[in-house]
Image (cartoon, rainbow, N blue to C red):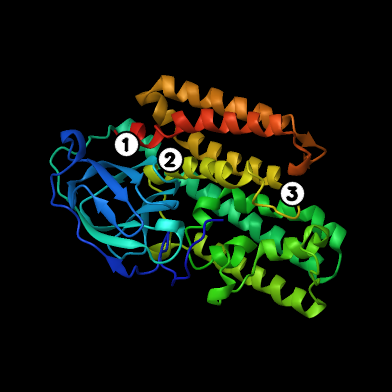
Amino acid sequence: MRKTLLAPAAVLALLPALAACTDNADSGDSADGDVRALTVASGDDACEVSAGSAPAGTLTFDVTNTGSDVTEFYLLGEDGLRIVGEVENIGPNLTKTLTVNAPEGDYFTACKPGMVGEGIRTGFAVTASDDDVEVSASDQELIDTAEANYRAYVQDQSAQLLEKTQEFVDLYEAGDDDEARALYPVARTNWERIETVAESFGDLDPKMDAREADVDFAAGEKWTGWHLIEKDLWPEDAEKGYQPLTARQRVTYADDLMANTTDLNDRIQATGADALEYPIDAIANGSIGLLEEVANGKITGEEEAWSHTDLWDFQANVDGARVAYEGVQELLETKDPELATELTEKFDALQALLDEQREGDGFVLYTDLTQDEVRELSAAVDALAEPLSQLTATLTA
């Protein structure tokens, strides 16, 4: 779960209006003389982008965290709601790169120090360009196929999530705890496979997938969703004095989760003007984002603090990342076959390690892993992350 703010619904991704604004530097002050290669210094109270505009095409933002807390960077659409691209979990003194294919138009850049609050926003213009990359008819066919297939995949996973969540909340409300515990990681699998899409709805994600540690109770935030119910189903790992939810409270929270899941599915299944779009760079960035979810939450065992079913989530994130990658693999093979081969091999190597931890229809608990096994899985994730980070730039070049 990414900690986001509540906001009204719009399209693929949502963010609230950001309060703090600063001015970008003048256009043309870009890194290495490449007007599409920009740098960003994300400090504790500033978001300095090297240029205020760039020509249409493939843009790269090298985002360096110059502050003292973990930060995020976004390129937002003209409405300030749609996320064109994002990079998350940038630690102090570290740099991550965002690559997006941006057509002419008005945008916003936004840094979010601490990954909480309203962040720092600045206007950004993408100007017309005469040197757009020409796309051959055969490549365009591959792109169209990839985008259509990914939309169908996300819609299918969302529909399955709705069905499994209904089964889960029915069991939980009825007090069939053993059955609910068995279904919990299975039902969450469909969420985790499309997590980067699901969490882009900034008003729903905190209600559905917030961990207790992410909730600012002192500020009046309320905790709801999957992990609240997880804690109630595994009370033996809760803090001393934890009081199980009453039957009425169970119904309240379970119905709330079901209502939000229904809302999420309605938005994902929307057609016409409200239909979500999955451009090729968003699919590639989604694959990268899902692997980052593994690195930041699952490999550390932080996601499932009471059930310890993190490896189910781990596998589902990898499933989603691989599906997104394989959707664009044929196009990648026309542009960089060596990168395609390397990515396939690294996905296979990571999957082989995960398969060693299978038990029955699922996996061993995270708490049963040895430190050596955690380190081995972490190394495999890192080995895949490096070539995967090149995917978007290669596809949009």
Q: Is residue 27 left or right of residue 320?
A: left
Q: CA distance from mark 1 to mark 2?
A: 10 Å
In the rendering, at what x and y percent does residue 137 appear? 30, 33
Q: Nearer the viewer, mark 3 or mark 1?
A: 3
Circle 3 sits in a helix, a strand or a loop, which is it? Answer: loop
In the rendering, at what x and y percent does residue 334 appear? 37, 24
Q: Nearer the viewer, residue 100 or 365?
A: 365
- On residue 346, which mark appears? none
Q: Residue at x 80, y 66 (%)?
A: 172
For label 1, the residue is 396
Q: Earlier in the sequence, mark 3 or mark 1?
A: 3
Q: CA distance from mark 3 to mark 1?
A: 39 Å
Classify 10 Å Cα crowding around label 3: few (below 14), some (14-19), many (20 and above): many
Q: CA distance from mark 2 to mark 3?
A: 29 Å
Count of numbered labels shown in the rendering: 3
Residue 121 position by quadrant:
bottom left
Classify 10 Å Cα crowding around label 2: few (below 14), some (14-19), many (20 and above): many
Circle 1 sits in a helix, a strand or a loop, which is it? Answer: helix
Q: Residue at x 14, y 48 (%)?
A: 128
In the rendering, at what x and y percent does residue 82 appear? 37, 60
Q: Is residue 180 left or right of residue 253?
A: right
Q: Amino acid at mark 1?
A: Thr
For label 3, the residue is 308
Circle 2 sits in a helix, a strand or a loop, which is it? Answer: helix
Q: Residue at x 76, y 35 (%)?
A: 358
For label 2, the residue is 284
